[in-house]
Image (tube, helix red, strand yellow):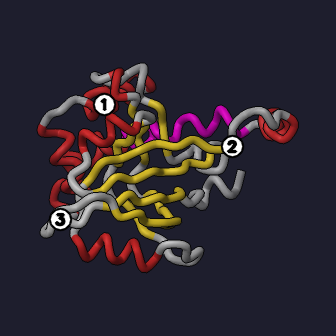
Amino acid sequence: MKRLQEACVKLYTKTSFLFYVVNRALRENDRSKLASLGPYCYLVYTYIGSQITEYASIRHHIRRQINTTESSSIVVYRGDRATNEKINEYCQAAGQKDKYFKWLSFVSTSLDENVAKTYARNILYEIELRRHSSNDQFVYLEKISYYTDEREVLLRPGVRFRVNRVDQMESDKKINRAKIYITIVPSYVSNLI
């Protein structure tokens, strides 16, 4: 099963029609694609969460409490585009602890900010992932990606985030450019372990 999941994830990282069709269907909640894309999405989705069992043991929790040298979070980056209305919504939500947003599709990010900048149209996200409380929501893809130099980290669909701050970047008259600093909110499942 793991080899099938890895093959599906690797195919997802390739620039192909599948990447676009899957994410459009998820973003638009297109249920007409459920029969054809559902099994594939399930395999990719469960691969992302498959690493949680590695961290679920009591021994791991004790070791994590004792070992304070391990970083408690990692930072990844995502280049994207957003409407001016969405950027304004992020600005208004910045710093509010009870305001959340959600990405409905799989979300490709990179450990390398320069890689993310190549995909940025008018938005650059700096995303904080709390390593242990969010480990069921992301997976490192460097070893199985078609583009290993992109240092990709894939986030699950439905991941929730909070906006910490928004910095306006250089812009022209028509395009509002911003760097959005966000923190991924732990899933309900990760709060149980």
Distance between mark 1 and mark 2 Cα atoms: 29 Å
Type of amino acid at the residue the image marks with label 3: Ile
Q: Quadrant of residue 42?
A: top left
Residue that numbered label 3 is attached to: 175
Amino acid type at circle 1 is Cys
**What is the quadrant of residue 88 in the picture?**
bottom left
Q: Is residue 47 magenta?
A: yes
Q: Is residue 74 above or below residue 87?
A: above
| Tags 2 and 3 touching, CB below 8 Å | no
Q: What secondary structure is found at the residue carrying circle 3?
A: loop
Q: Is residue 74 above or below residue 4?
A: below
Crowd around label 1: few <14 · some 14–19 · many ≥20 (10 Å): some
- Residue 91 x %, y %: 40, 74
Tell us which disc is closer to us: 2 or 3.
3
Residue identifier under label 2: 72
In the image, 74: left or right of 26?
A: right
- Which of pointers 3 and 1 lies earlier in the amino acid sequence? 1
Q: Decide which of tag 1 and tag 2 comes sooner along the chain.
A: 1
Range drawn in magenta: 43-56
Does dot 1 land on a helix, a strand or a loop? Answer: helix
Dot 3 alpha-carbon crowd within 10 angstroms: few under 14, some 14 to 19, many 20 or more: few
Q: CA distance from mark 2 to mark 3?
A: 36 Å
Which residue occupies the foreground of this view, 161 or 80? 80
Residue 29 in view in this figure: no
* Residue beneath the point at 38% across and 26% down: 6
Are the residues flagged by discs 1 and 2 in contact, CB closer than 8 Å? no
Residue type of the residue flagged with mark 2: Ser
The relative height of residue 22 versus residue 173 in the rendered view (above or below) is above
Residue of label 1: 8
Q: Position of residue 15 (x, y in %)?
A: 18, 32
N-terminal of the pair, mark 2 or mark 3, is 2
Residue closest to the eye, 104 or 89 = 89
